[in-house]
Image: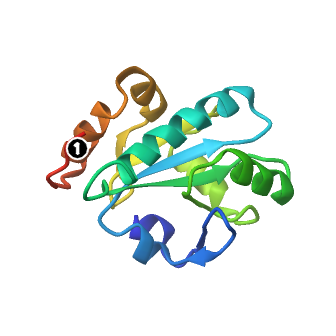
Amino acid sequence: MVDVFSGRPLLTRDGLAVDPEEVLQNKIVGLYFSAGWCSPCRDFTPVLCDFYSELLEGARPPAPFEVVFISSDRSPEEMAEYMHDMHGDWLALPFHDPYKHDLKKKYNITAIPKLVIVKQTGEVITDKGRKQIRERGLSCFQNWLEGADVFQNFSN
């Protein structure tokens, strides 16, 4: 992920800029393409929040997983409101960063919501993260770990 977001600050839910090299190192990353105006997004976001919380807060050690939100909201204010009201404590690409268009193209995003699970290199583990979480819950994470070649003693 260092490669994908190199030199581009990411934002916390509270709007603080963080260095992707520090916060994404040795983690599987879910690129969450979504927007507050999108009804299916608003339906899935709480499910993703629960999944994220259980992986990071419910496991010891916390799972090597992070979400980066790539917004399709209509304004920075809409993005901030959606993040504040519905999102977990994950990261986001800043609203005005034009790189979001490159990411949508790179990962072939034609509709939202879409959760693309990627390795450190940005290589796709699965582009069906949303479906897998809905169908299999936490058990899908072990498959992602194996697909990412990130080995850790993680049990759910």
Answer left or right for 145 relative to 89.
left
Between 155 and 96, the one lying in front of the other is 155
The residue under the point 23% across, 43% down is: 147
Q: Position of residue 120 (x, y in %)?
A: 33, 61
- For this view, does 32 lie left or right of residue 131? right
Amino acid tagged 1: Gly
Quadrant for residue 98, please give it.
bottom right
Farthest residue, direction top: 135
Q: Please, which colouring scheme is shown? A: rainbow
- Image position, residue 63 (x, y; %): 30, 53
Are there few (<14), some (14-19), or many (20+) residues within 10 Å of tag 1? some
Residue appearing at x 24%, y 46% in the figure: 145
Q: Quadrant of residue 94?
A: bottom right
Above or below: residue 133 compared with residue 119: above
Q: Nearer the viewer, residue 103 or 139?
A: 139
- What is the x, y in percent for residue 130? 48, 31
In the figure, is residue 86 to the left or right of 49?
right
| Rendering coords of residue 133 (x, y %) | 42, 30
The number of numbered badges drawn on the structure is: 1
Which residue is at a point 29% across and 65% down the rendered structure image?
Answer: 26
Q: Which residue is mark 1?
A: 147
Quadrant in which the N terminus appears = bottom left
SS class, disc 1 = helix
Residue at the spot 57% in from the left edge and 50% down from the top edge: 88
> Which quadrant is home to the C terminus?
top left
Q: Is residue 91 left or right of residue 82?
A: left
